[in-house]
Image (cartoon, rainbow, N blue to C red):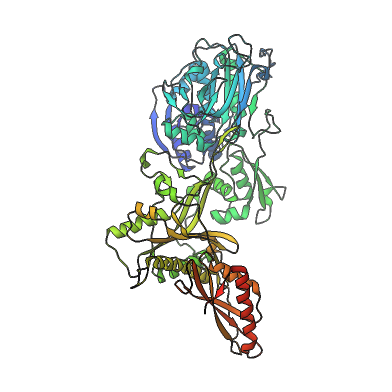
Amino acid sequence: MKISVRWLNEYLDPASVTAEGAEQVLTNAGFPIETSVQLPNGDVMLDVEITSNRGDGISHIGLAREIAAATGRRLRLPKIPPLFGTPPAPGAAPVPAPGESIHDALKLENRVPDVCPLFTARVIRNVKVGPSPQWMVDALEAVGQRSINNIVDITNYVLFEFGQPLHVFDLAKLRSGPGGGNGGGGGKPQVIVRYANDGEKLTLLDGKTVTLRKDELVVADAASAVSLAGIMGGAGSEVTGTTTDVLLEAATWDPVTIRRASRRLQLRTDSSYRFERMVDPRTIDLASRRAAALIVQHGAGAAAPGTKASGPRLLHGALSEGAPPEPATHISMRAKRCRDLLGLGLSTSDMMRALRGHDIQVTHEQGGDPAEAHADGGTLECIIPAFRPDLTREIDLIEEVARTHGLARLPIHEKIAVRVAAPQVSELAMRELGALLTGVGFFETVTFSFISPKAAEPFLSPDLETVSLCDERRKADPALRPSILPSLLACRRANQDGGVTNPGGVRLYEVASIFAQTPPSAGARGIGRGQEIETRVLSLLADALPVTPGGKAFDARQDTVRLVRGVLEAAAHALGGADAKIEVSPAVLPLSGFDPAASAELRLGGQRLGVLGLISAKVQQSYDLHTPVVAAEVNLGALLALYPPRSTAHALPAFPGIERDLSLIVGEEVPWASIEGLIAGAKLERLDGWEFVTAYRGQQAGPGRKSVTVRLKFRDPLRTLRHEEVDPQVGALAKLAGDKLGATLRT
């Protein structure tokens, strides 16, 4: 941000800040000076570094406010004369008012309120376009701007004065809708805020013609785009020497949308620089009135009464002078907390003075003289000005007190007191999880978060889209990964190419965030940005177990699926205790990366946890893997929430139990979960538990069927059971399995 020291002094009283003084104060306030240039007219141009969260500092008034707060000077804001009627100054000539209001002069439609919170327009008629006054030319040249004409120069002047980008259109060049027409139809000129049509072309003020995309914003008339919103105006509506009526635009836009278009088109302007850092809708009207007053004064024009405005950030649907579009932010600051953090014995009145220097309204809850309040100083209730959206918490206000008082004056202790605290529960859970995974042979990986869209597609849910960067430096892999599994597959291939082997196969895991977004919403009012989704997950990848002599590859793959399932169940038990249970439901996943014949959904406590399955042959071939692999990906937060494990310790049973193995021949499609559910629902008397023993497929089971052996455990806590008490229970379960699952007993 380039500023003029002479221009800066116009807003300070006394106006005696030197270049060296401004440099020292701004640097201490967190605005370091990159360069200082002596100008031929005796002025000095300073290039100030502005952090991305301080959009208010990208203006002369914003930096003058910082100097005033730090030095005790008074901030002098420019006086804005009324646009209509007689000015309050004695003997001043009345300001002419046209016969029509803004509502008669213009039709405004905002089709994208989600990315254009507020769009305002003023109309000034009968302007005389010509050279700017010399003081304005000198001010603009002092910050590296060339003078164009008085109307355009005023918008640039207010831009560097208030930090609010503005734009002026030649009103006669804005076309009206059907049945109208400025050339003879008598219709009102139309201004439409919308997304560009895909492939729509626009010639900008710099002479370049750009081809736009459907996620980029434009200001248009009834026929076509006339301005690239928030970045640069169009040549077709440019103010020239023949212009007589102008439309003054003051608006604010979604920072992400402006940044994306600016980067893709490689157009970095003073306007986009500010909109990318957010311009609050509540600050728009003041800058708009200032620019309109200057145009009336130096362009000899007359402003149409009123302001045309559209957007969701209006107060009661209208914009009026002094009425902010939304309520102000209220924050409480404890005086004692401020003193404790800064290590300074500041009085409450000193804190209030520092905050008021930044136009923060402060009241003291105890009333009376804050300097005489009791030791803790009470609480300061603060109302945050609209131009400081970065102030949202108590600690932000404490930082303002520290900056204003002087960071160099904060005490530095020779020793740092450290309080030893127990590790966070989440960290303990992660340690437990890592120990378990490494203990069963998994190696942790740390891979890059960006992948190619082709690699992301097999593991992207059909109802989501990838989050991609419009950056020429990331042509090969511009997408943030929607799953860690592509990264693990690439890592497995690197191990294979390097000849890495491991008994039982290579096993990998990684903990990281994955990213996706919902599709943009399309409708009559345009296209909105999708909602971005970030999830922290645990991903596992394991080679299929080696085929044993006389065994089958199918069995080896199934065994690996069970192995990964067992690892996840062991993780749940380690984190949540023996009662923590992961439910596995065979399913055809909506992800082409998994084999539909060997995949499942995982649930924990009835909530979806993740997925498990064999990687599809097509994806395996795309990574040129010689060995089939099984993968799982689960929500890490849900898993860690189980910690700490619940103890299930109890006294040893006093009487022996009876175990019975029941071998049920069922269809191949019947999962273990169905058998478990059947046993639980049977509510057998004295049943103490059950467990899976084995599954058999072969001639005795029959084609398309399998024999599942389950071990039933019976016990009575008060006496020894007899076999004749257990047999009816086992028989009842066998009959129920036949009725519900079509099962027969294996003999």
Which image quarter is the N terminus in?
top left
Q: Nearer the viewer, residue 385 or 323?
A: 323
Q: Does residue 86 appear to the left or right of 63 in the view shown?
A: right
Q: Does residue 497 appear to the left or right of 585 in the view shown?
A: left
Q: Is residue 322 above or below residue 174?
A: below
Q: Residue at x 34, y 73 (%)?
A: 550
Q: Is residue 714 above or below residue 372?
A: below
Q: Nearer the viewer, residue 338 or 164?
A: 164
Farthest right residue in view: 367
Q: Residue 498: image x %, image y %?
A: 27, 59
Q: Residue at x 40, y 39 (%)?
A: 471
The number of callouts visible is 0
Residue 44: image quadrant is top left
* Residue 150 in view: yes
Q: Nearer the viewer, residue 735 or 376?
A: 735
Q: Nearer the viewer, residue 491 or 670?
A: 670
Q: Residue 255: image x %, image y %?
A: 52, 37
Residue 40: image quadrant is top left
Q: Residue at x 34, y 61 (%)?
A: 627
Q: Does residue 145 appear to the left or right of 300 in the view shown?
A: left
Q: Residue 107: image x %, image y %?
A: 63, 21
* Residue 46 in view: no
Q: Residue 707: image x %, image y %?
A: 50, 73
Residue 681: image quadrant is bottom right
